[in-house]
Amino acid sequence: MDAAFIRSLQEKARANHARIGIGVWKADADLIASLKSATKYADLVLVGDAGSGCDCKLDPVGNLDVVRTEEPWSELVRLLKSGEIDGAVRGNLPAGRTMKCLAREFNIKVRRLALVEQSGWAFLLGPVGIDEGESLSDRLELAVQGARFLQSLGVLPKVSVLSAGRMEDRGRSERVDRSLDEGEQIAALAREAGVDAAHKGILIESCRGDDIVIAPEGVSGNLIFRTLLLVCGANSFGAPVLMDRVFVDSSRARSGFDGPVMLASCMAGATSKNRRRF
């Protein structure tokens, strides 16, 4: 995928202009101001503590609806489950509480892939949570469900599976050998499921141009993600949770939420036209 793919998502989000809930926790004036720019993509519902600078039910300038609650992680998930919003963005809510609530209410195992764009190359990266992707089956599900997610957006994806070494490194370490074996197996099983997947070993540079990159586990995936965003200046558009409703995870380290809101609004349009389980 390339920058044109991101532009197409932005256009679809503007056209759809879904009702998107976003979690806010101990928000300051700068955060509230940054959210107003995201209203070009969606009608926003702020869920949580919007701060004293946003004390009205509806802000007619920024189209910011406010639902005040002391447990915004629970309320955001409730609004999504009840259909009162078309999609949700975590915003700056605590990740642990929010993901636990989402998993409990929808009876799912949370799996997410981050949409990243670097120098014109856009791709999904996962696992990105430090406690995710520890098993072969988890990473396989990310590859297969991620491919189905991109197919729903009109992309025929290529998937790269990473592991802890080159193929010729076999024998240097039991841990590396195990990672290489799992990488080969994940790619093979993904191909059996109809996904165009290849095992690339540790050669992340050979993944450029592919649409999904599966890291060896969540710690290395999180390091790749943080290096791209915080060191290399890549753009992140949030991490969609692979489920049959629209929930986009977002890092609290970001200065604005245009990307995740855009992605959620675009996904809400696609989901409403063709609801399916990813």
Image (cartoon, rainbow, N blue to C red):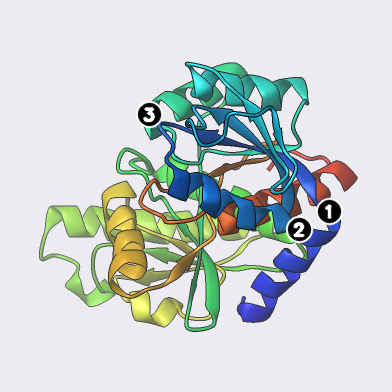
- The residue singled out by tag 3 in the image is 96
- Residue at 44% x, 76% y is 207
Mark 1: few/some/many CA within 10 Å (<14, 14-19, 20+): some
* Dot 3 or dot 2, earlier in sequence: 2
Residue 181 is left or right of residue 9, and the answer is left
Mark 3: few/some/many CA within 10 Å (<14, 14-19, 20+): few
- The residue singled out by tag 1 in the image is 16
- Amino acid bearing label 1: Asn
Q: Are marks 2 and 1 in contact (CB under 8 Å)?
A: yes
Given this view, does label 3 or label 2 mark the residue nearer the observer? 2
Q: Is 199 located above or below residue 80 in the figure? A: below
Q: Nearer the viewer, residue 99 or 26?
A: 26
- Residue at 84% x, 53% y is 16
Q: Nearer the viewer, residue 259 or 224?
A: 259
| Residue 179 drawn at (x, y percent) | 28, 56
- Amino acid bearing label 2: Ala
> Mark 2 to mark 1: distance in Å?
5 Å
Does residue 193 show up? Answer: no
- Amino acid bearing label 3: Gly
Q: Quadrant of residue 41?
A: bottom right
Q: Are marks 3 and 2 in contact (CB under 8 Å)?
A: no
- Residue at 27% x, 50% y is 219
- The residue singled out by tag 2 in the image is 13
* Dot 3 or dot 1, earlier in sequence: 1
> Mark 3 to mark 2: distance in Å?
28 Å
Residue 132 is left or right of residue 143, and the answer is left
